[in-house]
Image: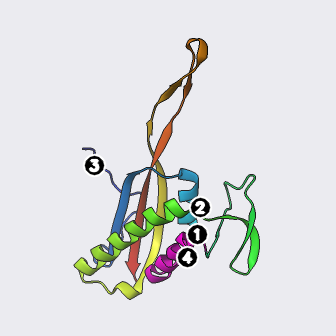
Amino acid sequence: MPELGYSYKVLEPERTVLASGRDLNISYKEAVELCRYLKGKSLDEAKKILEEVIELKRAIPYRTFKKKVPHHRFDNSSGPARYPRKVAKNLLKILESLEANAEFKGLDVSRIKLVHLAANKGYKIKKYIPRAFGRSTPYFRELVHIEVVGVEK
């Protein structure tokens, strides 16, 4: 197995907690937008937001990948937004893992702030669909790595 590190430089290891999800079968673009939205929030607030996204009560604003994205109400303003439910479910599992890691380290879970969330591209699952006249169409799926870093404030 390869040694997968983090893209975050840990300055205070005794107050920092890490968690990651590797090779997730989710959308990379949705993961980037959701990670950007949750960065800087507390752990409890981020978990509450993800539960609201799963229940379709809160839309996540899209800043980069927003072509042909419908406008929804979010945070008392409107703009391009979506409900990335599958990504939210996977990210909620990662945040629960981060919380368990913090409890194991003896940190106060209510004081943890998310300082780094990153979605990186994983490897590509390559498949081909056979077509007529001896042709084929690529049917690729790109997996995603998500890493989360929290610091006790």
Q: Is residue 106 left or right of residue 108?
A: left
Q: CA distance from mark 4 to mark 2?
A: 16 Å
Badge 4 element: helix
Q: Amino acid at mark 3?
A: Glu
Q: Earlier in the sequence, mark 1 or mark 3?
A: 3
Residue sitting at 35 percent across and 65 percent down?
19
Q: Earlier in the sequence, mark 3 or mark 2?
A: 3
- Please name the residue that numbered disc 2 is placed on: 33
Q: CA distance from mark 3 to mark 2?
A: 26 Å
Q: Would you say the residues marked 1 and 2 are in contact, meaning their CB atoms lie under 8 Å apart?
A: yes
Q: Would you say the residues marked 4 and 2 are in contact, meaning their CB atoms lie under 8 Å apart?
A: no
Please report the bounds of the magenta region as a residue range: 37-56
Q: Would you say the residues marked 3 and 2 are in contact, meaning their CB atoms lie under 8 Å apart?
A: no
- Please name the residue that numbered disc 4 is placed on: 52
Residue 134 lies in the magenta-colored region = no
Badge 1 element: helix
Q: Amino acid at mark 4?
A: Glu
Q: Amino acid at mark 1?
A: Tyr
Q: Could you tell me residue 33's position as x and y percent?
A: 59, 61
Q: Amino acid at mark 2?
A: Glu
Badge number at residue 37: 1
Q: CA distance from mark 1 to mark 2?
A: 6 Å
Badge number at residue 3: 3
Residue sitting at 47 percent across and 72 percent down?
115
